[in-house]
Image (tube, helix red, strand yellow):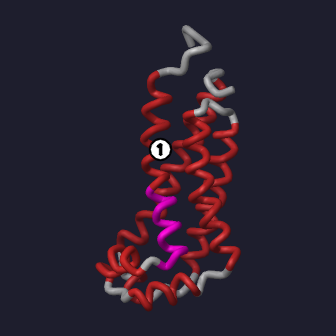
Amino acid sequence: MDNPGKAPWHLWVVGLVSLLWNAFGGYDYTMSQLRDPAYLEATMGPMGMSVDQSIAFLDSFPVWADVLWALGVWGSVAGSVLLLLRSRFAVTAFLVSLVGAILSFAYQYTIDLPPQLADNTMGKIMPLVIILAVVLQWWYARSQKAAGVLR
């Protein structure tokens, strides 16, 4: 790095894009945990689930699965913020997120899903996209820490 005191331009781009991506995950988690009817209708309704069915499905999650989901979501949000703050702890936050996401999705892949969700291709692909995004964010944070950009 030419100037160790100055962050490279790509840190700001990656940091802001990752924050926007992860903020949507935070919004989804929050609205789902609040059991917001309008949000559930907008997100689960197109898949053929009523608000009551969506709430019943979310209520069926054991507490530990909700905790893993929270770690996956909020670990990434924290990682993005820490990346923008140039903190080395972004690496740890993304790693926590990765573990939470993998275990949370593993749980979701092993349960009997409602038929509307079991037949949904996007529901099978999106977890893989999310995990790939977290892996890339973790890798990027690690590379920036190794380069001395993160303190």
**In the image, farthest residue toward the left:** 46
User: Taking 33 as reference, is 46 left or right?
Assistant: left
Q: How many marks?
A: 1
Q: Amino acid at mark 1?
A: Ser
Give the quadrant of residue 68. Answer: bottom right
CA neighbours of label 1 inside 10 A, class few (<14), some (14 to 19), many (20+): many
> Residue 113: image x %, image y %?
49, 85
> Residue 94: image x %, image y %?
62, 47
Above or below — where is 54 with respect to 99? Answer: below
Above or below — where is 124 with respect to 90? Answer: below
> Residue 14: image x %, image y %?
46, 35
User: Taking 44 as reference, is 140 left or right?
Assistant: right
Give the quadrant of residue 103. Answer: bottom right
Above or below — where is 65 with respect to 128? Answer: below
Give the quadrant of residue 74. Answer: bottom right
Q: Quadrant of the C terminus?
A: top right
Residue that numbered label 1 is attached to: 18
Q: Is residue 129 visible?
A: no
Report the front residue among 36 and 109: 36
Q: Quadrant of the N terminus?
A: top right
Above or below — where is 140 with respect to 40? Answer: above
- Residue under the point 45% across and 38% down: 16
> Residue 145: image x %, image y %?
65, 29
Magenta stretch: helix, strand or loop mostly: helix
- Residue under the point 40% across and 78% down: 40
Q: Is residue 97 visible?
A: yes
What segment carries the magenta color?
24-35
- Residue under the point 43% across and 47% down: 20
* In the image, residue 28 lies in the stretch drawn in magenta: yes
Report the front residue among 74 and 122: 74
